[in-house]
């Protein structure tokens, strides 16, 4: 039944706050949102794009709601991230000698966006 279709795109972005990296990572998140928005077709009302991200400072400086709005997305809900909902999930650092190591998830949320249909 098409009325019950549900789309979800998950991504967990992690980066400490240093201005050049922050801007590059914000562009990465915006690119993800832009690509995911295209995948939610106009007839798929109710489709969602989820971004999981840490919420304490300095990660709060990413301004995910603003990034989403710039890509034609509305934040409809923010929910505390629960690692137990993702069995088998294992995060990894992005680079360096410890790139196969995990990092602490910390205080994180799942940000749920829908497509603005009049964007």
Image (cartoon, grey):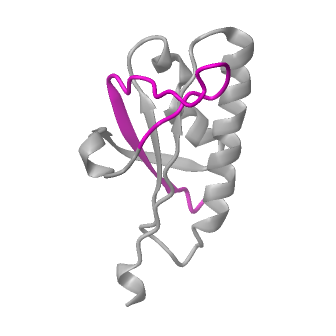
Residue 20 locus on image (x, y percent): 75, 13
Q: Which residues are magenta?
A: 90-119
Residue 80 locus on image (x, y percent): 27, 36
Residue 11 locus on image (x, y percent): 52, 45
Front residue of this view, candidates 28 and 114: 28
| Farthest-out residue, bottom | 1
Left or right side of 95 for 49:
left
Up-down: is 72 above or below 103? below
Quarter of the N terminus within the rendering: bottom left
Front residue of this view, candidates 93 and 39: 93
- The residue depicted at 57 percent of the width and 41 percent of the height is 68
Residue 69: quadrant of the picture: top right
Left or right side of 55 for 14:
right
Up-down: is 6 above or below 18? below
The answer, for residue 85, to whether it is visible in the render is yes
Up-down: is 110 above or below 2? above
Residue 17: quadrant of the picture: top right
Judge whether residue 104 is colored magenta.
Answer: yes
Question: How many labels sit on residues?
Answer: 0
Residue 76 locus on image (x, y percent): 38, 48
The answer, for residue 119, to whether it is visible in the render is no
Judge whether residue 36 is colored magenta.
Answer: no
Quarter of the C terminus within the rendering: bottom right
Front residue of this view, candidates 72 and 60: 60
**Magenta segment, principal secondary structure?**
loop
- The residue depicted at 70 percent of the width and 36 percent of the height is 28
Left or right side of 74 for 35:
right
């Amino acid at each position: 039944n098409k009325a019950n279709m549900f789309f979800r795109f998950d991504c967990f972005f992690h980066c400490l706050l240093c201005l050049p990296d922050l801007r590059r990572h914000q562009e990465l998140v915006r690119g993800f949102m832009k690509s995911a928005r295209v995948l939610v077709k106009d007839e798929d009302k109710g489709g969602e794009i989820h971004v999981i991200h840490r919420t304490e400072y300095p990660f709060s400086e990413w301004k995910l709601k603003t990034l989403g709005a710039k890509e034609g997305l509305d934040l409809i809900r923010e929910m505390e991230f629960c690692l137990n909902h993702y069995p088998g999930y294992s995060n990894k650092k992005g680079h360096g000698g410890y790139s196969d190591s995990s990092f602490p998830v910390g205080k994180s949320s799942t940000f749920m966006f829908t497509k603005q249909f009049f964007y």
